[in-house]
Image: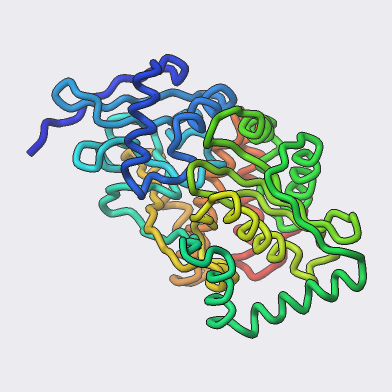
Amino acid sequence: MSAEPTFEIRDLDSLTAEERAQWNAWAAADPDLASPYFRVEFAQIAGRVSPGSALAVFQREGEVVGYFPHQRRGGAVQPIGAPMNDYHGVIGPREGRPALDEVARMLGGARFSVNGWVGSAPGALISESFRTTIPPEGGYDAWYAARRQAFGKYFKDKERARRSMAAEFGPVEARIGLRDGTLLDELIALKREQYRRTGRHDIFACGWTRDLLHALMAAEADDFGASIAVLTAGGRVCAMEYSLHAGRRFHFWFPAYIPALARCSPGIMLSMETIRQGAEQGYRDFDYGFGGETYKKYFCDTVQPVAEATILKPGLSAALGGAAASLLGLAGAERGERLQASVRRRWNAIEACETTSINRLRGAATAARAALSKATGRTATA
């Protein structure tokens, strides 16, 4: 049995050049840590923007065995950059880095919340993340031929939609790798309107989340960065997506499209064009993140397990969680469980975004109205 881990809390900008190199070497050596979210560049940029950021450095017998960048919101501990951070965990060698429950115990806090933990997570809810891998032989054309053979009707419909869009609006074109702050602000405006329309918490209202996307896009690194892809028809913007990339991994992150053009599936067209052009630039793994949206099955051929958990300290937080469970249980056991998960995820996002008590309370009130409307089968009102 290896020695119990110890830890120290440091500022992310205190990392030395040797420590930064060690961090990225550990991430590069483990395929499970290939996502850009595990790069030291992401952590340090997020640490300069997200309030309450810090770094836990874990050791066993005096040797560093892992880094965990995180943030605090009142009594809560979360991965750095949450709720923007799709994947998180301890960056270190598999045999030495602490598990989820160990990290939660050592860092303390009333709550320790994760939704895309990569690594050992005893007792956590396991879900799946999805990505597609372009084969080295044949590239995009071979990948698309295989997808089209497996899901002929779906991709024929998308090809037809593209022809229809071109006929109605003009030539359909896509560009990727754009670093344009004005385009990013337009994309954020579209996302905020989507959140308002669907009743979800506006994660950009707090300000620092917008700053994070701008800072990542402005970063200068050899094989790490963020950029925007845009689909136009006749020169008119139809869809945009903000993505994060590092090494061979391209992570689709914030998609947005013009709602009036939904019938044309502009987001799907842009995704396909991004894979085609990205493969030409050397990217091989295109990551769609966790969650089982139906369209992903048509694109993705690789699955990775990730863990979701909210670890509570005994006492008031746990009691409040039980009270919420009882309330939602009025909707029936199975439906109540789904609503509990929805409420938990909404609250985690609100808590991560909002840095003041009043804004957290306002967000919680909105989420509660939405949850109760779902529980009673009514439509929420603004």
Residue 288, position as x, y percentages in the image? 54, 57
Q: Tell me what residue is drawn at x 44 percent, y 23 percent.
A: 54
In front here: 189 or 357? Answer: 189
Residue 241, position as x, y percentages in the image? 69, 51
**What is the residue that sits farthest to the bottom in this orientation?**
153
As drawn, 371 above or below 59? below
In which image quadrant can residue 363 be found?
top right
In front here: 120 or 369? Answer: 120
180 left or right of 66 in image:
right
Residue 299, position as x, y percentages in the image? 55, 68
Q: Tell me what residue is drawn at x 36 percent, y 59 percent.
A: 126
In front here: 326 or 245? Answer: 245
Q: Quadrant of the N terminus?
A: top left
Residue 64, position as x, y percentages in the image? 24, 25
**What is the residue that sits farthest to the left in this orientation?**
1
**What is the residue that sits farthest to the front in this orientation?**
137
In front here: 110 or 45? Answer: 45
49 left or right of 37 in image:
right
Instruction: For residue 171, say whether it is visible.
Output: yes
As drawn, 146 above or below 138? below
Q: Tell me what residue is drawn at x 34 percent, y 36 percent.
A: 91
Number of numbered discs: 0
In which image quadrant can residue 353 be found?
top right
Q: Tell me what residue is drawn at x 52 percent, y 36 percent.
A: 223
In which image quadrant can residue 245 be found?
top right
As drawn, 48 above or below 186? above
263 left or right of 321 in image:
right
As drawn, 54 above or below 81? above
Give the colour scheme shown. rainbow
Instruction: For residue 329, say whether it is visible.
Output: no
